[in-house]
Image (tube, helix red, strand yellow):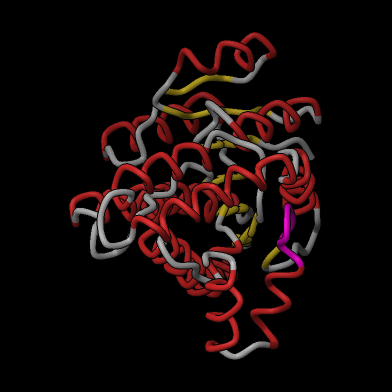
Amino acid sequence: MKKVILITGASAGMGKDFARELLKDGHTVYGAARRLDKMDDIKALGVKIISMDVTDETSMVNGVDAIIKLEGRLDVLINNAGFGSYGAIEDVPIEDAKYQLDVNVFGAARLSQLVIPQMRKQHFGRIINISSIGGKLAMPLGGWYHASKFALEGLSDALRNEVKPFGIDVVVIEPGGVKSEWADIAMDNLVKISGNGEYEKMAKKFAAMSKERGHSVAEPDVITKLVKKAIESQNPKTRYSGGFMAGPLLFLRKILSDRMMDKLFMSQLK
């Protein structure tokens, strides 16, 4: 069955790839983002473009209402909008930390609230939350980003059980390293925030390591395939993971103690 799908953060990276590939499968795809000019390419393919800021209540309400009014249904929400506010926890202004959680957690939560009534009415829906392996393990200098993804994981677990009786599934996708503008923005922010103080050595080493490994990260289609599984499966898994180092790191998190994980991470930053 072809579905009506809303994807946030569709102006770049994984979100844009989701939109392009799900459209090929015959679904009705709405791509939402603030930067409408960045979506001209997928608009030309047939993706329906919506202006949406996941920190703005009015734009979220209007976007969801418009889709339901036009299509009569909304089957899949992909909460993909997000970014990484990197820097030592001590250094990151608390206003920036709040904005990190506002985008990565509260935006996803509010959109979920807005689509659930329609999905319950249909007795069918899929809410797919794009988390990260950083929602299961935390490296230094990414504390606020990890806090947002840990929160999204817990929120998803609670929501999954609340809405299951109404025919709604909640699925978490946990990407590892994936090619996008995300890393460059996060590392630029890291150096800006913590590159000239007490954490300078660690910050510059972390940024250099990220840049060095940039050529090894996976293409977005690796995650797009997982999203397709989450949409197409009659009984989707609660979690899917993929991308650069996702499998090994999640395995190590399961078998190693906190102290051993600390040593592993810090050994990379000496």
* Front residue of this view, candidates 77 and 10: 10
Which residue is pictured at 39% across the width and 52% down the height?
Answer: 86
* Front residue of this view, candidates 143 and 203: 203
Apparent side of residue 73 relative to residue 116 in the rendered image (left or right): right
Which residue is pictured at 69% across the width and 70% down the height?
Answer: 249
Which residue is pictured at 39% across the width and 30% down the height?
Answer: 52
Apparent side of residue 192 relative to residue 167 in the rendered image (left or right): left
Which residue is pictured at 31% across the width and 52% down the height?
Answer: 194
Q: Which residues are magenta?
A: 241-247
Residue 244, magenta (yes or no): yes
Q: Percent position (x, y) of residue 146?
A: 44, 64
* Front residue of this view, candidates 108 and 222: 222
Residue 25, magenta (yes or no): no
Quadrant of the image occupied by residue 29: top right
- Specify the quadrant that holds the N terminus: top right
Quadrant of the image occupied by residue 142: bottom left
Q: Relative to 264, is 56 above or below? A: above
Q: Percent position (x, y) of residue 48?
A: 57, 20
Q: Percent position (x, y) of residue 152?
A: 46, 63
Apparent side of residue 116 relative to residue 130 in the rendered image (left or right): left
Q: Percent position (x, y) of residue 76?
A: 61, 45
Apparent side of residue 233 relative to residue 163 in the rendered image (left or right): right
* Front residue of this view, candidates 95 and 26: 95
